[in-house]
Image: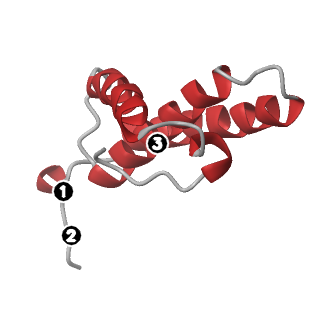
Amino acid sequence: MRFTYNDTFLTKDKSEDEITNIENEAIREVNLQSTTNDFYFEKLVTCLVYMELCKEQFEDESVRKKYDVYKDEFKKYSLLSSTQTPPHNAQIYRG
């Protein structure tokens, strides 16, 4: 696994290999968004992993709520990562 997953409610019954496979798919998906900022990249990947783990337990209403929270976080981080100006393009003005 490349990242740490702290939501033990979702990860407790999963092996490291299972989470790694889900994470690899999430990484491929986030790569398609061309996210260059490491902070947002990690946030987007972890949200996608948690969302996928939630889908496997949708019969539990509390898991559906968790899914919605992670989905909203994913949307937020996706928007923020798309509006970031790469540092090498930033201009500094002195006045």
Residue 34, image x, y percentages? 25, 29
Q: Secondary structure at mark 1?
A: helix
Q: Earlier in the sequence, mark 3 or mark 1?
A: 3
Residue 54 in sight from this viewpoint: yes
Q: Relative to the observer, which residue lies in front, 79 or 3?
A: 3
- Residue 27, image x and y in percent? 31, 30
Label annotation for residue 87: 1
Question: Which of marks 1 and 2 precedes in the sequence?
Answer: 1
The residue depicted at 52 percent of the width and 38 percent of the height is 47
The amino acid pointed to by label 3 is Thr
Label 3 sits on residue: 46
Mark 2, secondary structure of its residue:
loop
Instruction: Give, as a three-letter code, the residue at label 1.
Output: Pro
Please state if 81 lies on the left or on the right of 28 as rendered.
right
- Give the residue type at disc 2: Tyr
Distance from the alpha carbon under mark 2 to that under mark 1: 14 Å
N-terminal of the pair, mark 3 or mark 2, is 3
Q: Quadrant of residue 45?
A: top left
Q: Looking at the picture, how far across and down is residue 52, in whole percent?
A: 56, 25
